[in-house]
Image (tube, coloured by chain):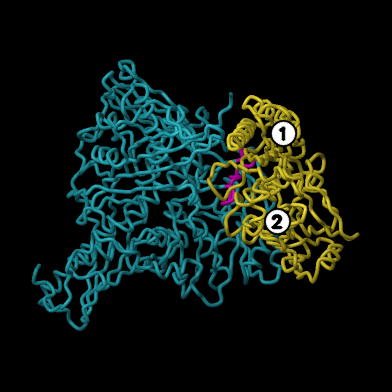
Chain colours: A yellow, B cyan
Amino acid sequence: MKPFEYQRAGGPASAVATMTHPGAAFLAGGTNIIDLMKLGVTAPDLLVDVSGLPLRQIEPLPDGGIRAGALTANTDLATDPVVRTRFPAVALALLSGASAQLRNRATIGGNLLQRTRCRYFADVTKACNKRRPGTGCAARDGEHRDLAVLGGSPQCVATNPSDLAVALALVDARVELLTPDGPADMSVHELFRLPGDHPERDTNLPPGALITAVVLPATPIARLSTYRKVRDRSSFAFAAGSVAAALDVRDGIVRDVRLAFGAVAHRPWRAYAAERMLRGATATVDNFERAADEELAAARPLRDNAYKVPLIRNLTVGVLRGMTEASW
Amino acid sequence: MTTFLTSLTERATQPAVGVGSPRIEAWDKVTGRAPYAVDHPVPGAAYAWVVQSTVARGVVHDVDTSRALAEEGVLGVLWHGNAPHLEPVGDPELMVLQSPRIAYRGQVVAVVVATSPEAARGGADLVRVREEGTTADTVLRIDHPALYQPVQVNAGYPARSAIGDVDAGLAEAAVRVDATYHTPAEHHCAMEPHATTAFWEHGCLVVFDSTQASTAARDALAGLFELPPQAVRVVNEHVGGGFGSKGTMKVNTVLAAMAARLVGRPVKLALTRQQLFALAGYRTPTIQRIRLGATAQGRLLAIGHDAVSQTSQLSEFVEQSAVLSRHMYAAPHRLTTHRVVALDVPTPVWMRAPGECPGAFALESAIDELASAGNWDPVRLRIDNEPPVHPEERIPFSSRHLVECLRDGAERFGWSGRDPRPAVRRDGEWLLGTGVAASTYPSITWPSTALARATADQRFDVEVNAADIGTGARTVLRQIAADALDVPAHCVAITVGDSAIGPATVAGGSTGTASWGWAVTKACRLLRERIHRDHGGRVPDGGVAVRADTTLDVRDRPEFSRHAYGAQFCQVRVSTVTGEVRVDRLLGVFAAGRIVNPTTARSQFLGGMTMGLSGALLERSILDPRTGDFVTGDLAAYHVAVNADVPRVEVSWLDEHDPHLNPMGVKGIGEIGIVGTAAAVANAVHHATGIRVRDLPIGLEHLVPRSR
């Protein structure tokens, strides 16, 4: 139990200005940070509530992209007709997450900054380099069935829990920021990071920055995108593995392809190696398998999560195969 | 009897028993008016928060409470250095704060009492516990050197039973199965946490407690605090689920009473979801080996069932997993054994169908394996091995309609013509399969008392200290009372959930309706007789009241093997891409005596089957052997089935009349629904994929295809 101050932000600029206050944190939908405060995982001195800021607009951009305010509810982005047409993977990813109640409450900006669901991160009596740098990683030799098989480090094998982030990585989305130095923007690929020696940093967000919008850039191939999430429970569970894919096949040849994996790494995992291998290749199951294997050659599973490697491989092949058949 | 209550205008036009009706308290519950344990408004209440050990085995050297006591709102801190003495009552888990010894991680080492829950929790964070841990032993293994055979297992059964020579029977068999099954630790996860409001008044202790057994809780509290039983009152008017975890008292009740005495005001203590994982009990993990041998014609020659489970260093709790194998099937050679090991873990407790639930997963999976090995239909194989009498005790069954359940279920499910070959039915990427399993659960009746009172204005009050844990107990007891009185149910007011009513048994072991209902029936019949005999059929102005006690009636019943039986059928689909399992359909057919209320009964069967599905596919409490705690210690990690997991569930029952049970002819239905479900799912998964999963829960890691 730690007392903290609560302020309702008057505007984006004043909200960012309050971040100079030590121990300040933003509060948006509150679907993650409040839980973490109850568990003692995070203990801000000042909660700056940005949920009332006017950042809920979804605007189709003239070039075919979309800009969505960071406080757009997950439900609202997922059900937007333009999003569903131009970026079905984004809508599907959002709808696969959490429950209806949480999707109504959660914001897309907050979704990108949610913390890992690693059990040791959430338990303050356990070693966790992400929560307390230098204490060690209890997960590596502990319960890690849900944790990373790609891009982990000796310090951390946490996964990014966001479904949305996987779909955003697929379409090279950008986030618009307001920083203490003024407006900025960065791609989601720059935003997310691997844990390396600093697992305490989930993202490369500049200090004090507020995500003000998510921009889905015009991406014609994204009209042919999908997202498939796998988990033991049918609903209301984080992914054991997920694949976002976009595929353009003509005359049996892969003209273009994009692939991103979820729940396998500290960041959404864009499968560039697989994409490279598939571009220009014939759209066959063999080639899909080879491409998935190429990407997953880097996998370093732990004692109890090796199932994720064939899971992602099969899922990649299954999703691409389904999209190929659908395009005939 | 026809002259009974001749002066009354209202007579029952039809029996209440057998007619579906919603729960009496349903409206209060859905509108939030039903008070649970810490909802009762008591003036001046303080709040308690527990501090738990962070080592699994060790000692508490010292507890520094000074910073906590300096915190605003903190009224007091209890630890073993200042806690009041408790007198042992047979459950060492209840001897909280009595010694520096730590027997498991998460054990309560201090409790903070404050004027608000926030202040209590804040104070708990400031308590400094100097504890020293030593190497802990927390993992159940089949080759654990400290495994031993206890004298008896839960429910008083002998640990071992042997008839004939199992090895010889197996040697003689044409078809054999020898397989080992693992079931995980599981937690009950009732909606209402273990919670208590306690206060002392003129030396008497009153508690509102979330318990399945307020008479037993009263007796335990009286023993612990050295009070006469009549100086303790335990009220449990509404209980938000229990599943066995509230069958015996847990530390929350003791701590709340201690804390209330310390601060001289009422204290409320509600354990958090996370705290429950160490303090509210769990189903033990099991390792079970099943050996079956059959003739070439599919007649069992040998049944061997060896069960291993864990208990704590504090007390011996032995899950009776192999007991069902003593009566499910006929065979000349039989052996069942139980071994247990005491680990540095919390004591396991009863969880819905203790023994039968994990036991049936092993036995009913093995029967399916035998059917596959012998190329026999699994329904037929079960029917062919039906025993005429209890195969080990050689006593008659009071009634047994397993064969009828299997036949009726097969008919309803569309089992006939099933292609037994595994992995040959496809629907796109999905493989389809069907499975069957049998179920059983003992039909036990315990003594209880009940009070029936008639008033001159033609109303009846019936009181019995039942616990309605969301089952509809008070509703069915009112139906039973109405029929015993021969009046419409709306003329009867039923009161349950208060130890002051008089002794009654636990809402556990599927015994409630049989046990409480018998006492209610007896009291109501006595009341009728009394009104008729002493008052000429007219209730005098002062009313008439009688109390009934069934102790002798229950004791004097003739010897029978009394069990409910059932059969579960399941259809699953398994993704050939991902290994995801989705249940398409579940059907349960049960023979469980007379069904008092079809509405609430269906809910019990359906709930049991849903919990069984959840256990088959999702539930697992994972203990970290390095720290000795369950890392899956909240509902974000301990997954129970959600609506999307639960498909078309069909429930039906046979019209079973058993004259050897109790006056109502009821067997109890709270648990049998869960018993065979996991095996039915696992058997269907095998039929779908050809993969036999012997470790629960069945997950992606078992079924995701690994090679091209």
* Placement of the N terminus of chain A among the 4 image quadrants: bottom right
* Towards the viewer: A150 or B593: A150
Instruction: Look at mark 1 in the image and give the residue it sits on.
Output: A255
x and y, in percent, of residue B313 in the image: 52, 42
- The relative height of residue B280 versus residue B578 in the rendered view (above or below) is below
x and y, in percent, of residue B674 in the image: 39, 45
The verdict on residue B628 being magenta is yes
Callout 1: SS: strand
Q: How many numbered marks are there?
A: 2
What secondary structure is the stretch in magenta mostly built from?
Answer: loop
Q: Is residue B434 left or right of residue B4?
A: right
x and y, in percent, of residue B410 in the image: 29, 38
Instruction: Look at mark 2 in the image and give the residue it sits on.
Output: A108
Callout 2: SS: helix
Residue B97 showing in the rendered view: no
Amino acid, disc 2 = Ile
Amino acid, disc 1 = Arg
Q: Which residues are magenta?
A: B624-637
Mark 1 or 2: the one toward you: 1
Q: Residues within 10 Å of mark 2 (few under 14, many from 20)?
A: many
